[in-house]
Image (cartoon, rainbow, N blue to C red):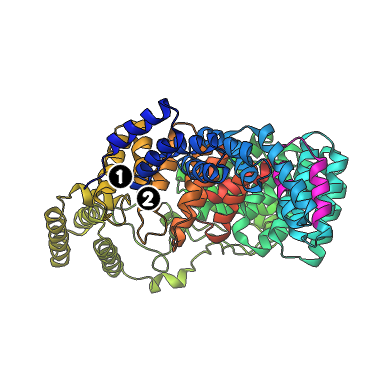
Amino acid sequence: MSFDKTKAMRNAEKHVAQGKIRLAINEYQAVVAHDPRDITTLNMLGDLHAKTSDRRQAVECYMKVAEHYATQGFAQKAIAIYNKVARLQPDSIEVSNKLAELYKLKGSLSEARSHYETLARHYESTGSRIEALAMWKQIALLDPNNTEVCISLAESYLKEGQTEDAAEAFAEAGGRFDRHGAHEEAVKAYLRSLEIQPDALRTLDGLIRSYSALGKVSKAVEFLEGILQKEPYNRDILYLLIDCHIDSQNTQGAERAVLQLVEIEPANYPKLLDLIGLYLKANDLDSAARILSMSSEYLLAGGQAEDCSRWISAILDRDASHVPALRLLVRYCSWIKDEEAFRIALERLAVSARAKNEVDDERFALSQLVVVRPFETQFSDRLAELKALHGFDGGDVDAELLRAGFDQPETQPVVAVVEQEVSPVIVEPQAEAVPLPMPAEPEPVPVQMVSEVPAATEVDEMKFAKDLESISFYIDNEYHELATKAIEEIETEFGRRPEIEEVKKKVAALRNKAASNHSLTVEDMRSEFGLVDELPSDEDYDTKYHTAIAYKEMGLTEDAIRIFQEAIALVSPLDGTRRFFHCANLLGHCFMTTGHASMAVTWFTRALETPNLDDSERHGLWYELAMAYDAAGNPVDAHRFYEQVYTENVDFRDVASRVRSEMAVH
């Protein structure tokens, strides 16, 4: 005979109305036994047990109800039920712990702090010092203005031999002192942290900021240089040292540190640009041009020609006849192959160099001009005059090679080793520059080498073969659009060839295959977007899960949350499927959408309970947790999870920039 729930509920209500509590309890127990998910009835059953003074049974019912509400993200309802338990068991450490976490999640910091203090005192009274410290740490995190508790916590950690936690607590105290303008106290706290963990970059950054706020940049520099003596190749310390020098306008110190950094790793050349700005601010144009000369090859070869031009203009705006800057302008114009701009730059250089008696620069400019403007005899006359005055011999520019640098034929011939573009040949005067491990500057091609250059037809075939190789790469990786575009370009340049027709057929075949597989079902699309990993076997769960997704996609987020919560109640993180993981993850995203970040934290944390998560799943959940903590106003935990992702996968989304910005702020 099947159980009639409606009849049982009606009987229970009748018994309650008649004051027959025991009979009502029996009816409600039967309902719950047949439907364990009936939380409302379970709560009423707890109330009836409490009325009959059966505290053990009441607490058992209440704990199940409270746990259900807590896991579903209903913090306020869970708090109300746990408070019922607390009235029956006022000394329950488990309940105090649950209430502390829920009040924290809800944002009721005062109530959370009260329960954490109860827990801390309990653990201290029982000699559980480690557990007590964990509670005091929670109290410290809840009150960002209480610095003394951080210091006390750090000292306690030291006594217990928990050095990493002690260093973290001292660093946190330093940050709090700093935010309140107590920079002297901040320095003391940071230094104590660094005594324990000397290589903590975040703490070092805080110490430097505190020293700077006190006007003691020299102290910061001294501290960092002390570390560099032991670790001369520490790039992070060099970055901090450079920033110190730049903040204090110490150009010489900044240059030493920047050159050391670039020597260790040339890819750090952008720091040279900061140095140029510093020299310009100090109106030291010679030094600015010298540093720009060092970095110009990086800028030009790295596709940053416009940045190079901007810095040259910045110098010439202050001194239009500045010879080193004009020399750089000539180099820039030759790189971009602007013959008219190149001529004008040479003329400006020749005039300025003559006015300042810079003979080598004037001779360099004139030797180029006699080729670019052969009919303007004043250049050749002045060049002959210089040769006679200073006894120069030879050093003339190869006119053919110089002009070839500016030629733009329909199919441009290669005038150097294959795959290497050659800038116009320019014989420059010896520039004053500190040697750096920089890319070699293209050297003039001697006349006797011209005969060794591949013929135009040979070069064309080499280019054709390379273009075909690129198209094959596109086809192999299914970049159909790129392959089609590349085929059009190669056919325009080389005409119709059998090889081109062959790759056309390959692309057409791949397109036909893709079109035949294009009719995706709803399930295929969900799988494509990673919404479903495995189809759940439970039909009820399946219906609810897909209904919730449909609500979510229609923007009905509140309805989606309700149905997701019903669906997740049917599964477990340990049921061997990914159903709980996907449902919890989507609940987290829904709560973020509705602005309930603390509830999102709960569900992203629950999703982590799923066993055997792969790295990408864990990193994704940590990242979402960090964003949720950020949105909930908890930057400490946010930074902790960003760092966890950064530690294991520095390329994950934008986590690297987030960690750097967090370090800059804190």
In contact (CB < 8 Å): disc 2 and disc 1: yes
Question: Which of the numbered marks, if any, corresponds to residue 582?
Answer: 2
Q: Which residue is mark 1?
A: 545
Q: Which residues are magenta?
A: 135-157
Q: Residue furthest top?
A: 17
Q: Secondary structure at mark 2?
A: helix
Amino acid type indicated by mark 1: Tyr
Q: Nearer the viewer, residue 46 or 262?
A: 46
Residue 391 appears at what percent x and percent y? 69, 61
Q: Say which residue appears at 70% left-offset and 42% top-offset.
A: 116
Q: Is residue 155 magenta?
A: yes
Res. 241 visible in picture: no
Residue 213 appears at what percent x and percent y? 82, 38
Q: Main secondary structure of the magenta part?
A: helix
Q: Nearer the viewer, residue 509 or 523?
A: 523
Q: Residues within 10 Å of mark 2 (few under 14, many from 20)?
A: many
Amino acid type indicated by mark 2: His
In the picture, measured across the screen, residue 176 lies left or right of residue 482, that is right
